[in-house]
Image (cartoon, rainbow, N blue to C red):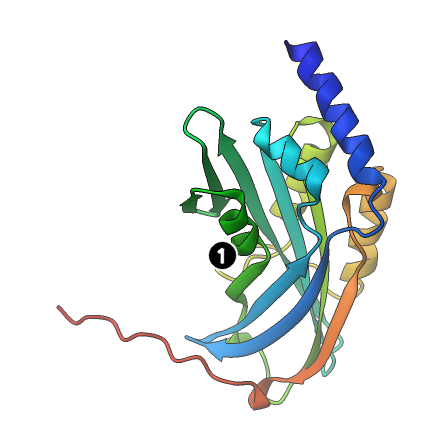
Amino acid sequence: MGALRGMLLLALLAAGASADEGPRALSVDPARSGGYLVADLEFENLLPRPLENTLRSGLPIVIDCLVEFQDETSGESRALLLRSELNYDVWEGVYSLRRDELERAFGDFLALHRACHRQEALPLAPLGELPPRTSFHLRLRVAVNPFAGGESDRVLRWLAETVSDPRDPGAREFRLDLGGLIDGFIRSAGREEGWGESRRFGPYRLDELRVIETAEEDPS
């Protein structure tokens, strides 16, 4: 059974590699909300038919998005890794999407597909750490791979542990030539086939962004 599943996985990966277009960010809409710089992200080409079939077979799929904040005022960069894990329960017929500690269930693939292709109000950095008049770009790159361990898992785990998460005050950060370092590591690890093109959005100005009002906490 294990050998058969491995052969199926290799066949699906080969079919996926022949796709004309890889996963990529389609649009970015930054805003200010609750003391954070946040962004709505929209993607395309995340789940072509070979990867959909992989998921339906019961193998998890991992979607990783590297989001780099490039401060044009100071010349510094910071980044975070947004990871989504997709699963399908072949017995219950239920799809699931997990990001961090949040997990959502879906009754059909189309609903899961819509949820994967748009991420709303993703926190990028605390506003208190950014000059109010700063100008910046956002650079995004997306990878979609079956979660099968081995070298790909080692690379993704390394990235997850190394890039910064603004919600974790103890997280480390890359600065300056962060994009080049990430691209170089991906190439040296031989994982280029899973990553789509890098796309740069902006420039944006922090003090000119729209503001998303957050719900007030119930004092009771």
Q: Which residue is mark 1?
A: 168
Q: Position of residue 22 (x, y in %)?
A: 78, 51
Determine the residue positioned at 67% across, 83% down. 204
Count of picture labels: 1
Q: Is residue 18 above or below residue 82?
A: above
Q: Amino acid at mark 1?
A: Asp
Q: Position of residue 123 (x, y in %)?
A: 52, 66
**Image quadrant where one finds the N terminus:** top right
Q: Farthest left residue?
A: 220
Quadrant of the rendered image containing residue 173 = bottom right
**Image quadrant where one finds the C terminus:** bottom left
Out of 144 and 138, give the one closest to the viewer. 144
Q: Position of residue 106 (x, y in %)?
A: 44, 44
Out of 125 and 94, give the one closest to the viewer. 94
Left or right: where does residue 167 sit relative to residue 198? left
Q: Is residue 52 above or below residue 134?
A: above
Q: Residues within 10 Å of mark 1 (few under 14, many from 20)?
A: few
Q: Position of residue 125 (x, y in %)?
A: 55, 69
Q: Is residue 191 visible?
A: no
Quadrant of the rendered image containing residue 212 = bottom left
Out of 123 and 108, give the one closest to the viewer. 108
Determine the residue positioned at 58% across, 90% down. 208
Determine the residue positioned at 71% across, 53% down. 45
Q: Is residue 216 visible?
A: yes
Q: Look at the numbered disc 1 and give the secondary structure of its residue.
A: loop
Left or right: where does residue 177 sit relative to residue 130? right
Out of 118 and 31, give the one closest to the viewer. 118
